[in-house]
Image (cartoon, rainbow, N blue to C red):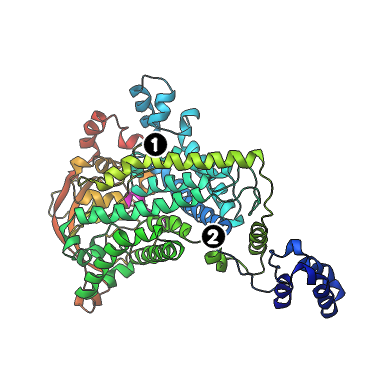
């Protein structure tokens, strides 16, 4: 390598003698290559590594490998999201679901004048408008399966184009748009925005990993960076403007115990010393409110921002089951790194790194391929993307600067640019709703025995170890966390669940972790009990018995109900009778 580089520095007059000296040292097999390196016309082109196992050092400032990492990461999140949809959509929004999407589409159709047109698509953009509604379960399953197949292909192969990425975005949008309450979480909009930006990372048709005539656009890279800046600033500002505990640095005293779905590590983190919780809160403010501005301070500071954001999200992943939110937030942080920084993720002798090195060498020698009509159109598209994101960011920026900031809100029907935020307020105590059933004819009798249902992941039995499921997501468990600090009148779907449990409905039972009446007759009564939960103290008598929680009854959440008593309630809301399924 040193000889070759030295040869390139020789003036044109001495090129012949340098070439002759090199030929004497090198084998006949390398002579043609040495002559090319000594040619004055090629003096600016660094030579490629000679040995197959030699490390390929990449230059800074290009994003070919970054693009591969980005769209594979996006498709990993898509894969998880479609897996959640496939496993849970039937019970939540299917034909026999708690909130059937067919009925929702019908109500939207009536609202927009009875026609499926532009107004209906603008209100609820979904492919389901154009599918047969008689078998909505099959439609939902097929959308999820196609999404799984496409995202799995990109994830495994590292190859994508605009067609595939646009298809994934359209498919997931079709589910979210009809998901109603079950898809009302902020990360749904965040995935749609991230997925939309991912469309413009890729070539239109080509499935080459590194298509020479379709370089990654710097505008596209900056849209991802702008996304992580908005996510973190939104999360930081909503905290400072929200719960006082974020300002007096005490929020982390409660968070691990009261977060929606704790994991086993949450149990131990909750018992950390007070000074550690203060440090956590200060670090949170630093990373969410200060570090995002590093993005605009040059390559090195931008990479520091990316590294800190990824580290922060990894800590959050370890400390609780927050769905795929934190995994998804890592994705735009990856755009802070160029090919030189991400090269370690690729085999040093692999085709991807060597192809990128070749492209960088050609760019250095100004040997770029002549622009084609397609390349020029692509540049126009990229500029248009930048203008669109800038325009749609205006209300988002206004919201960020407003003292009345709203989090997790979309200002356009396609959810292209959104506001974000999390845990603006922290609950100081954990309450849970526990469903209980009995076979007794009289729910108020002295000898009545109430048996408890268990959810798939949320706390129930005090001896049950907290689950570890991230990035997977149990939607009902999350909604039950919200319902616990509200009333059943504010969450009527809870009464529908109770009615369906009275009927031993298999659809709803698929969302539960334990049915105490499995293989037995149906329960005659169901009630909801309200409990306050706290982690046990390590080393305490309760913990020694294998208990993770201690709980204390607050009172009834809803009174005992039976099928007969619910018939009129269901009828008044146009719900099918619980035992009609």
- Label 1 or label 2, whichever lies nearer to me, is 2
Residue 438 shows in this picture: no
- The range drawn in magenta is 471-477
Tell me if mark 1 has few (under 14), some (14-19) or many (20+) residues whose alpha carbon lies within 10 angstroms of its own: many
N-terminal label among 1 and 2:
2
Tell me if mark 2 has few (under 14), some (14-19) or many (20+) residues whose alpha carbon lies within 10 angstroms of its own: some
Q: Which residue is mark 2?
A: 61
Residue 25: x %, y % from top left: 82, 80
**Which residue is farthest front?**
13
> What is the C-alpha distance between the residues marked 1 and 2?
42 Å
Would you say 332 lies left or right of 538 here?
Answer: right
Question: Where on the picture, by quarter, is residue 50?
Answer: bottom right
Q: Is residue 271 magenta?
A: no
Question: Where on the picture, by quarter, is residue 538?
Answer: bottom left
Residue 487, disc: none
Residue 413: x %, y % from top left: 38, 35
Q: Quadrant of the N terminus?
A: bottom right
Residue 395: x %, y % from top left: 31, 40
Q: Is residue 472 magenta?
A: yes
Compare residues 580 and 4 and report the one nearer the observer. Answer: 4
Q: Which residue is mark 1?
A: 178
Element class at badge 1: loop
Compare residues 34 and 574 and report the one nearer the observer. Answer: 34
Would you say 347 lies left or right of 38 here?
Answer: left
Residue 556: x %, y % from top left: 14, 50
Q: Badges 1 and 2: C-beta atoms under 8 Å apart?
A: no
Would you say 247 lies left or right of 95 here?
Answer: left
**Does residue 262 lie above or below 495 as drawn?**
below
Compare residues 23 and 220 and report the one nearer the observer. Answer: 23
């Amino acid at each position: 390598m040193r000889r070759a580089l030295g040869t390139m520095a020789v003036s044109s007059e001495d090129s012949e003698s340098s070439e002759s000296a090199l030929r004497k040292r090198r084998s006949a097999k390398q002579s043609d290559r040495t002559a090319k390196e000594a040619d004055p016309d090629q003096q600016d082109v660094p030579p490629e590594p000679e040995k197959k196992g030699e490390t390929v050092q990449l230059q800074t400032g290009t994003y070919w490998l970054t693009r591969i990492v980005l769209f594979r990461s996006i498709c990993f999140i898509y894969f998880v999201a479609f897996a959640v949809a496939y496993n849970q959509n039937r019970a939540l929004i299917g034909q026999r679901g708690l909130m059937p999407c067919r009925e929702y589409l019908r109500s939207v159709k009536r609202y927009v004048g009875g026609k499926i047109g532009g107004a209906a698509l603008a209100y609820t953009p979904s492919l389901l408008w154009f599918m047969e509604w008689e078998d909505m379960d099959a439609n939902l399953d097929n959308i999820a399966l196609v999404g799984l197949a496409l995202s799995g292909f990109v994830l495994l192969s590292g190859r994508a184009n605009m067609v595939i990425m646009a298809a994934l975005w359209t498919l997931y949008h079709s589910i979210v748009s009809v998901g109603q309450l079950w898809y009302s979480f902020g990360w749904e909009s965040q995935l749609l925005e991230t997925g939309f930006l991912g469309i413009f990372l890729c070539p239109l048709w080509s499935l080459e990993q590194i298509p020479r005539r379709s370089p990654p656009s710097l505008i596209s890279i900056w849209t991802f960076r702008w996304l992580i800046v908005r996510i973190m600033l939104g999360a930081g500002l909503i905290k400072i403007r929200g719960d006082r505990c974020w300002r007096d640095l005490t929020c982390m005293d409660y968070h691990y115990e009261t977060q929606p779905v704790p994991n086993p590590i949450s149990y131990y983190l909750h018992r950390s010393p007070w000074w550690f919780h203060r440090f956590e809160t200060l670090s949170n403010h630093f990373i969410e409110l200060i570090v995002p501005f590093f993005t605009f301070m040059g390559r090195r500071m931008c990479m520091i921002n990316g590294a800190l954001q990824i580290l922060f999200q990894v800590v959050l992943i370890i400390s609780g089951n927050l769905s795929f939110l934190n995994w998804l937030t890592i994705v735009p942080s990856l755009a802070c790194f160029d090919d030189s920084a991400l090269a370690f993720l690729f085999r040093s002798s692999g085709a991807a790194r060597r192809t990128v090195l070749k492209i960088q060498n050609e760019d250095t020698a100004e040997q770029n391929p002549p622009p084609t009509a397609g390349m020029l159109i692509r540049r126009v598209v990229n500029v248009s993307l930048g203008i669109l994101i800038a325009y749609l960011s205006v209300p988002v920026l206004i919201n960020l600067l407003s003292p009345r900031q709203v989090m997790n809100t979309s200002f356009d029907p396609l959810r292209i640019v959104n506001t974000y935020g999390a845990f603006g307020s922290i609950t100081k105590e954990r309450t849970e709703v526990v469903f209980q059933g009995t076979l007794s004819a009289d729910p108020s009798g002295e000898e009545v025995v109430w048996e408890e249902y268990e959810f798939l992941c949320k706390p129930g039995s005090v001896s049950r170890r907290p689950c570890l499921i991230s990035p997977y997501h149990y939607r009902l468990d999350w909604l039950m966390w919200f319902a616990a600090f509200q009333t059943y009148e504010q969450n009527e779907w809870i009464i529908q669940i109770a009615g369906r449990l009275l009927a031993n409905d298999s659809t709803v039972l698929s969302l539960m972790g334990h049915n105490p009446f499995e293989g037995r007759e149906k329960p005659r009564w169901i009630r909801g009990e309200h409990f306050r939960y706290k982690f046990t103290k390590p080393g305490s008598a309760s913990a020694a018995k294998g208990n993770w929680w201690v709980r204390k009854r607050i009172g009834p959440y809803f009174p005992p109900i039976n099928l007969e008593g619910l018939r009129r309630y269901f009828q008044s809301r146009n719900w099918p009778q619980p035992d009609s399924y």
